[in-house]
């Protein structure tokens, strides 16, 4: 040990000599009774343990024992200490993703709990509303009886039991007043007025078109569409004949009662078929019969109608199946013969055209036979229109050539869409021939008076105008 006084300056020089750095890189910090020596030169070649072992004797001699513990910690400010600090920072960063994931999970959990609580509260409120509806019904009962059953009284509290007056059996039997409670509101009083207004509209609708005006209507499709939707549909509210539901192909397509065809009674029961008489040109009665496509259990009724009405022409405007849905049952044989009930039907000959087929059919009933012409048009998609109207016009021309006074039976699937287009075009052609003008609005309105919903879509309504234009340009002999 050197004999020099162990002054702080001396110790600083010793530290500088030990680290082999200039003395100005070694500093002394006094912290109360502690003397902290530290080196700021990062390139110093020593570690904390070496310094502690080396400087300890000097510190003892300088009576600075308290600084021994501080020397390594201060010397920890060297490059080696910085490396350890970086490693600690790196280890901390490794936990950051886990912390982020944990925070996200907590947020998601909070959102799920909030949604669950909100849904439960809504269900609770709905249940409460239902309980209130049961206690305080919003629909008042309708008293069908004109006599007052009991005097008016304030609404009873749901938590109190009303007192019931004791009445004898004779008193109860002696009352002839009846109470009928309806849970639905009574129908509005203006329904009859609305129905009357629809009928008046159908009876008065008119828009007579010259040939030039008819051609120009196709240039303003928007106006034509508006005109179509303003025509009342005139669908019946409900079927009058009880038990007829299974005899209707479509639940909402039912025949209007005033023009409904009534089959002859059998076994004391009136017959039913979903069919209506349709007036023809100039109001000719029973010019057509519009009906639905027969179903397996209505084929016999269909042939009963043909026989009863002495029909000689049947127009079929549908395929048996369209878009994987049954549209009509096969009620005629493709070749040969077939029996439906008491009717025997046989095909005598077939002629083929571009979009339709014509069959001569003989059908017999009770030793009597009749002949029917069957026209089967297959180029018309359901609730749509054909690509061209020429084939339809040609079909009508063929039907006109064989038509007599008996009604022409026309059916598609429901008996209102394609059926309505055919009949409207047929009547329009007759009007063009007789008057050199046409009133399609009046024709469709008249048909809907006879059978609700005739001509289903505005595309079909537009197609009628196209077909009549084709007739004028390609079939009418003289337009002058």
Image (tube, helix red, strand yellow):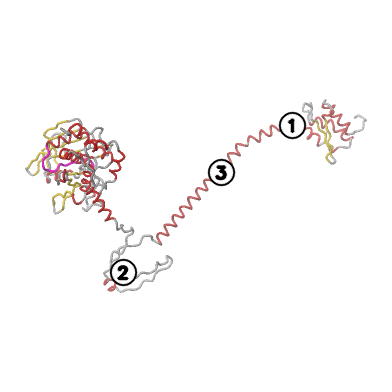
Quadrant of the rendered image containing residue 192: bottom left
**Cα separation between marks 3 and 1:** 39 Å
Please provide the residue range marked out in magenta: 402-414
Quadrant of the drawing holding the C terminus: top left
Which x, y percent locates residue 256?
A: 21, 50
Q: Nearer the viewer, residue 259 or 54?
A: 259
* Residue at which label 1 appears: 81
| Label 3, residues with CA under 10 Å away: few <14, some 14-19, many ≥20 | few
The residue at the far left in this view is 367
**Cα separation between marks 2 and 3:** 64 Å
Q: Residue at x 52, y 46 (%)?
A: 112
* Residue at which label 3 appears: 107
Relative to 130, residue 174 above or below: below
Quadrant of the rendered image containing residue 396: top left
Relative to 159, residue 265 above or below: above
* Residue at which label 2 appears: 149
Q: Within the magenta stretch, is there residue 403? A: yes
């Amino acid at each position: 040990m050197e004999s020099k006084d162990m002054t702080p300056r001396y110790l600083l020089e010793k530290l500088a000599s030990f680290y082999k750095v200039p003395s100005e890189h070694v500093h002394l910090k006094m912290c109360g009774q502690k003397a902290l020596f530290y080196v700021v030169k990062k390139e110093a070649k020593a570690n904390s343990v070496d310094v502690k072992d080396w400087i300890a004797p000097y510190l003892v001699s300088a009576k600075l024992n308290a600084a021994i513990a501080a020397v390594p910690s201060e010397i920890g400010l060297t490059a080696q200490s910085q490396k350890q600090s970086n490693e600690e920072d790196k280890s901390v960063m490794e936990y950051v993703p886990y912390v982020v994931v944990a925070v996200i999970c907590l947020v998601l959990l909070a959102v799920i709990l909030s949604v669950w609580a909100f849904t439960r509260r809504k269900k609770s409120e709905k249940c409460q509303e239902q309980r209130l509806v049961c206690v305080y019904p919003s629909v008042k009962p309708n008293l069908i009886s004109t006599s007052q059953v009991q005097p008016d009284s304030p609404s009873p509290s749901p938590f109190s039991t009303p007192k019931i007056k004791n009445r004898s059996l004779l008193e109860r039997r002696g009352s002839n007043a009846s109470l009928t409670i309806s849970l639905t509101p009574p129908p509005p009083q203006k329904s009859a007025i609305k129905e009357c207004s629809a009928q008046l509209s159908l009876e008065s609708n008119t828009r007579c078109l010259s040939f030039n005006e008819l051609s120009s209507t196709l240039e303003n499709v928007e106006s034509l569409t508006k005109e179509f939707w303003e025509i009342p549909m005139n669908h019946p509210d409900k079927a009058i004949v009880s038990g007829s539901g299974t005899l209707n192909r479509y639940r909402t397509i039912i025949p209007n009662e005033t023009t409904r065809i009534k089959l002859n009674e059998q076994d004391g029961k009136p017959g039913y078929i979903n069919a209506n008489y349709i007036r023809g040109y100039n109001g000719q009665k029973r010019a057509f019969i519009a009906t639905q496509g027969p179903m397996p259990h209505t084929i016999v009724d269909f042939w009963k109608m043909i026989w009863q009405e002495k029909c000689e022409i049947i127009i079929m405007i549908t395929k048996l199946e369209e878009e994987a849905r049954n549209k009509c049952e096969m009620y005629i044989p493709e070749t040969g013969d077939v029996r439906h009930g008491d009717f025997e039907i046989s095909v005598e000959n077939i002629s083929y055209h571009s979009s339709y087929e014509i069959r001569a059919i003989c059908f017999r009933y009770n030793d009597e036979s009749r002949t029917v012409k069957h026209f089967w048009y297959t180029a018309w998609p359901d609730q749509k229109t054909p690509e061209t109207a020429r084939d339809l016009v040609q079909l009508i021309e063929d039907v006109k050539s064989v038509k007599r006074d008996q009604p022409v039976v026309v059916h598609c699937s429901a008996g209102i869409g394609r059926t309505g287009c055919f009949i409207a075009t047929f009547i329009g052609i007759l009007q063009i021939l007789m008057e050199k003008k046409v009133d399609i609005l009046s024709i469709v309105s008249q048909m809907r008076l006879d059978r609700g919903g005739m001509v289903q879509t505005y595309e079909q309504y537009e197609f009628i105008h196209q077909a009549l234009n084709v007739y004028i340009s390609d079939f009418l002999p003289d337009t002058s």
